[in-house]
Image: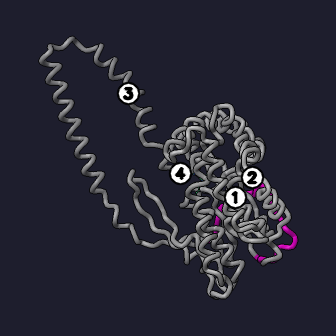
Amino acid sequence: MSVYRRILFKFYGNSSLISQNTFKNINHHLCLLPVRSISTSSKPRSLKGFFKLGLTGVTVGALVGTGYTIHHQNKPRGHIINEQTFIEPVKEVPKVEPSRKVIYPNDDSGLKLTLYQYQTCPFCCKVRAFLDYYGISYNVVEVDPVLRQSIKWSEYKKVPILIAQTESGYQPLNDSTMIISALASYLKDSDKSLTEIAKCFPFISFYDEDGSKKNEIMNKYFLMLSNEQIYPDEQISKDERKWRKWVDNVLVHVLSPNVYRTMDESLQAFNWFSEVGEWDKNFPAWERNLIVYVGSSAMYLIGKKLKKKYRLKDDVRESLYDECSKWTKELRKKGTTFHGGDHPNLADLAVYGVLNSIEGCSAFRDLLNRSNIGTWYSAMKDAVSSHRGAKYL
Ligand SMILES: N[C@@H](CCC(=O)N[C@@H](CS)C(=O)NCC(=O)O)C(=O)O
């Protein structure tokens, strides 16, 4: 995969959003030059010759096109559907010096965790919000978004990846929602090991409409508790799941078009990412500059495509305000500080985490000025930064 494409992947998240055509089109443009030079250098042809050549071209094109379509449609897709796979424990992971260590002296979870992340990726922020709130220590490995050497050992190529040290090696956990559900299950009911819990989140692989391979993690919004008494109110947990899904399927999608709304905002955002991700320290200068300048231009363009794909309003800020007001409206209805009542639940942590990822961007400042989410957000910031969840463990 080209470095350019990887940069798009990093900030785009969902690979299917980078249209295959973007790259095909680039290639097509490049192809125009040699084709033209061949035709100008050849001898003039008769009209009949041109017609014949054109007809042959169209026929060959149609045959190849049809053949490709048939091949594409007949490509075996079903064979891996329903084939369940688990995230296998690994014996070793290559030793890398953590970019930083987050240590909470009162942490008695017994967990030894390392988070492979991008500092401002919304999904990584979500996982950190959870760990910080519960005061669970962890090492951070800031992944180089271009070369991604530090996650070469993993078959899963996205971040966050969390690994938990076990007696016989390491248990990787992939996907922010699954990571949080697995850890929350473990913290509420540590009868099962994380390896056993990871098995409760099997994934199935399938090909999507574009023919790209996707994984779907089963049960990822559910906590795996052996004792039903621990989570007694089904309605509360249903509500929590509903909002966690909304974060992954709706809220995150309004962020990029807002953060990269104009070229200026995009560049500002990347400079802020660089600052908080300590790219100066973690990556060579050429790479940091490459990410900032190529990344911000690419994301500006991609932001426009995402706006269309997710049918955001012409003024994308309106979509951001609308979504956030759904959250605050529900909060008003409940009449509590948090969705979880007087302390945050997993939905609060998820919303806080993803909004926290844009805290240094003008979109976030506008959001605070134009909506009433600020009160909830500061209460969350306070709860997370004082690790208030530790007392509920
Ligand atoms: N559903 C996943 C999404 C993770 C994701 O898309 N992460 C992006 C970064 S924001 C990623 O790693 N993209 C691939 C890449 O950078 O190569 C989750 O919740 O963790």
For marks 1 and 3 on the same chain, the one whose residue lies earlier in the sequence: 3
Task: Give the residue pinned by disc 1.
Answer: 328
Residue ID at (87%, 70%): 105
Q: Position of residue 178 (x, y in %)?
A: 60, 68
Q: For the view shown, which residue lies furthest in the left direction?
A: 48
Amino acid tagged 2: Asn
Residue ID at (27%, 47%): 69
**For the residues bearing labels 4 and 2, Cβ distance under 8 angstroms:** no
Residue ID at (21%, 30%): 57
Q: How far apart are the two marked residues, 2 and 3, measured between alpha carbons? A: 53 Å
Which is in the foreground here, disc 3 or disc 4? 4
Question: Does the image show residue 273?
Answer: no
Is 196 situated above or below 102? Answer: below
Q: Is residue 387 left or right of residue 242?
A: right
The answer as to whether callout 4 falls within 8 Å of ligand 1 is yes
Task: Give the residue pinned by disc 2.
Answer: 372
Task: Please give the range of residues in magenta.
Answer: 91-110
Helix, strand or loop under label 2: loop
Amino acid tagged 3: Cys
